[in-house]
Image: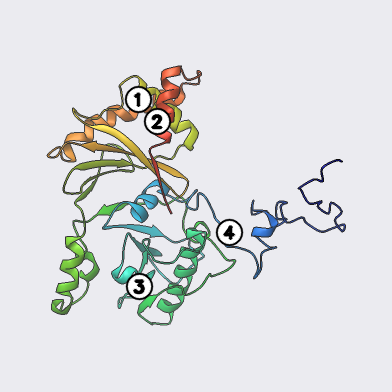
């Protein structure tokens, strides 16, 4: 007697116009239909893998959001966004008090925070929603904290609100004293400010290369360098340099892995204690030149380079 199949028969006929649960969702999200618009309760939050692409200083924005404790940068608004503001600028901050998404200062200035507690799939859209609300509050003369309590839904992204031709000028601070630089009578804030400052590791942005940040975490020093190249291309280039022994910055330094954040990779080096930021300026410049040559090399990877690439790929930490 023939054995019965243990696999239940599945209905294969679908009504014209219907989408199968395992098929791609027609909305273009890249998710299966059952995990998107076919999910109970509606579509899941859309995840944008590289949300800051196209913004001036994309790599620095990623660094300020994920790696740098205390820093600010001037973000220039597009003229049509807020024509009544003469300077049309916003202070982009790595972190604001209580991880606030935005603050409208008494002066009417707007501070926009990067390190926040909400996450709705597209940080650029979330920042744009917060910035729009802060602009409205500033126009109404209502200083205070502005934030998000739920998914803002469809709307503009930060790329739609800023001047894409204006450079992003980053200033790294020793601590969070910039929070109260325009406030009189700071005695009641001294305790909270001291606590925040104690938690901030010393950090310096290198001057001879872009998007590279030295930091001292107490037990060791690191260089974290956010790179704009596509992941596969960058891994190939780093593998070539690693296999050739050309990925050291200074003696006893080591490329230990990399962070993956918002669609970009940030290689991380361990540095001996006492190295300091100034001592790696020239080595970082030389490494950057070697990396550019490796990025331009289109020959197939050798066996040792493939092995190096696999090792580097296994030493990645994704930051979400």
> Gap in Å between the C-alphas at discs 4 and 2?
31 Å
Query: Given contact means CB atoms under 8 Å apart, are the residues at marks 2 and 1 in contact?
Result: yes
Identified at 42% across, 21% down, the residue is 305
Q: Is residue 154 above or below residue 294?
A: below
- Report the coloring of the rendering: rainbow
First along the sequence among labels 3 and 1:
3
Query: Given contact means CB atoms under 8 Å apart, are the residues at marks 1 and 4 in contact?
Result: no
Q: Helix, strand or loop at disc 2? A: helix
Residue 20 in picture, x, y percent from top left: 77, 55
Q: Pointer 4: what residue?
A: 46
First along the sequence among labels 2 and 1:
1
> Gap in Å between the C-alphas at discs 2 and 3?
43 Å
Classify mark 3: residues with Cα within 10 Å, few (<14), some (14-19) or many (20+).
many
Identified at 20% across, 42% down, the residue is 221
Q: Pointer 2: what residue?
A: 311
First along the sequence among labels 2 and 3:
3
Classify mark 1: residues with Cα within 10 Å, few (<14), some (14-19) or many (20+).
some
Q: Helix, strand or loop at disc 4? A: loop
Identified at 66% across, 64% down, the residue is 39
186 sits to left or right of 284: left
Residue 254 in picture, x, y percent from top left: 26, 32
First along the sequence among labels 4 and 3:
4
Position of the C terminus, as image quadrant, is bottom left
> Gap in Å between the C-alphas at discs 1 and 4?
36 Å
Q: Pointer 1: what residue?
A: 242
């Amino acid at each position: 007697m023939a054995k019965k199949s243990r696999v239940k028969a599945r209905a294969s006929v679908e009504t014209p116009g219907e989408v199968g649960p395992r098929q791609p969702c027609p909305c273009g999200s890249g998710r299966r239909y059952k995990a998107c618009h076919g999910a109970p309760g509606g579509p899941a939050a859309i995840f944008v893998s590289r949300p800051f692409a196209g913004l001036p200083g994309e790599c620095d924005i990623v660094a300020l959001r994920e790696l740098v404790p205390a820093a600010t940068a001037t973000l220039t608004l597009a003229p049509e966004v807020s024509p009544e503001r003469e300077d049309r600028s916003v202070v982009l901050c790595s972190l604001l008090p209580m991880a606030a998404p935005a603050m409208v200062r008494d002066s009417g200035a707007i501070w926009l925070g990067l390190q926040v507690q909400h996450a709705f799939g597209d940080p650029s859209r979330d920042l744009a929603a917060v910035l729009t609300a802060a602009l409205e509050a500033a126009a109404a003369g209502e200083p205070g904290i502005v934030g998000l309590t739920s998914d803002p839904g469809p709307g503009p992204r930060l790329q739609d609100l800023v001047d894409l031709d204006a450079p992003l000028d980053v200033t790294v601070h020793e601590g969070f004293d910039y929070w109260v630089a325009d406030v009189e009578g700071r005695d009641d804030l001294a305790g909270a400010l001291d606590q925040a400052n104690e938690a901030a590791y010393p950090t310096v942005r290198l001057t001879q290369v872009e998007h590279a940040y030295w930091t001292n975490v107490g037990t060791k020093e690191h260089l974290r360098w956010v790179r704009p190249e596509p992941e596969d291309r960058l891994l190939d280039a780093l593998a070539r340099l690693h296999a050739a022994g050309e990925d050291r910055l200074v003696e006893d330094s080591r490329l230990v892995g990399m962070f993956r954040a918002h669609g970009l990779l940030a290689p991380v080096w361990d540095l001996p204690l006492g190295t300091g930021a100034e001592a790696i300026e020239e080595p970082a410049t030389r490494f950057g030149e070697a990396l550019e040559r490796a990025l331009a090399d289109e020959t197939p990877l050798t066996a040792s380079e493939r092995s190096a690439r696999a090792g580097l790929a296994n030493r990645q930490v994704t930051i979400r």
